Amino acid sequence: MTPTVIITGASRGIGKVIALELAQRGYNLMLAARSEGPLNAVREECEKIGAKATACVLDITTEEAAPALRDATLDAFGPPWGLVNNAGMAESSPLAKTDDDLLQRHLDLNFFAPMRLMRAVLPRMVENKGGRVVNVCSTAALSGYPYVSAYSASKHALLGATRSLAREFARKGVTFNAVCPGYVRTEVFDGTIKNIVDKTGLDEVQAEDKLKKLSPQYRIFEPVEVAHTIAFLLSEDAHGITGQAISVDGGEIEH
């Protein structure tokens, strides 16, 4: 039977590239995001590759989203093999301006939404005696960076949950891992560059150079590098890997 993978935040950036990579590998795909037009465009691209794909338009931060996405997956394909919690947000702010609203928005999308979705789908994975959960975190889940305390805290929380759940389900055939990219060339990265330019007076080349220097490889990473890592963790070959934080950062974080 063809395995099914749920991907959140699938309408753009890393999520879109994950969807296209998994389509090429023959998975059935349940694609979730808020933006209907872009999401349907990704679904159509996956179908052109030859994959079966369904788009589920919803706000993953609502309490009803997780059971709705689980039920849509069961109706379309049956129990899922994999879950990729990719949807996320990152806003920079100094501590003085990091108010409760900013904290809550980061936690709602980066932590509570993945937790609800894992809680919704895990019983079906356990019934099937196997599954893979991959949470897209960040190097900010492994280290601290200035001006992103809300983001970093929410990703640390998701990584902690990933490690705990890996132990909880270790003998039930389900693995949990986190992929922790450095700076990846996406629309979000473009916004980061603009923010640096606006706040520092550096030009775009100088701003990108500043971020490249964080990695010993001196480069910005491509979404497909993250997608390849996730594809491996979803595979049968990765059965012995669980509770891990896999960095895609050119050696920036050693752990």
Image (cartoon, rainbow, N blue to C red):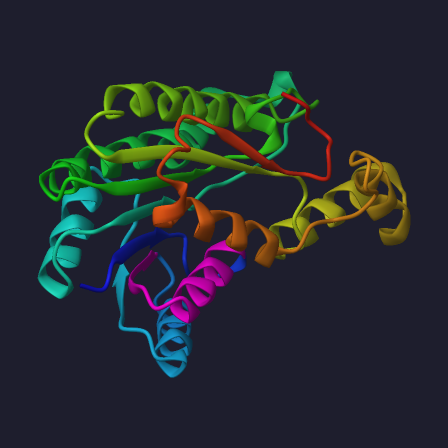
Q: Residue furthest bottom?
A: 48
224 relative to 178, above or below = below
Tally of numbered tags: 0
Give the image quarter of residue 23: bottom left
Q: Position of residue 49 (x, y in %)?
A: 41, 79
Image quarter in which the N terminus is found: bottom left
Percent from the top left, x then y, of residue 119?
20, 32
Q: Is residue 195 left or right of residue 208?
A: left
Q: Which residues are magenta?
A: 14-33
Residue 216: image x %, image y %?
82, 35
- The answer to whether residue 186 is left or right of residue 213 is left
Identify the image quadrant of residue 217. top right
Compared with residue 160, is residue 116 higher up or lower down, i.e. above or below?
Answer: below
Does residue 27 belong to the magenta stretch?
A: yes
Of residues 46 and 10, the one nearer the viewer is 46
Q: Is residue 167 left or right of residue 20?
A: left
Q: Residue at position x 55%, y 25% from top?
A: 141
* Residue 17 among magenta residues: yes
Which residue is found at the position 12% from the left and 36% from the top?
Answer: 123
Horizontally, is 79 left or right of 192 in the view? left
Q: Is residue 252 above or below residue 221?
A: above
Q: Residue, x 12% and y 58% (percent of image)?
A: 78
**If the image is split into quadrants, where does the C terminus sit?**
top right
Q: Position of residue 30 (x, y in %)?
A: 27, 60
Where is residue 190, by image quadrant? bottom right
> Please, is residue 55 above or below residue 210 in the view?
below
**Residue occupying the point 34% across, 18% down:** 164
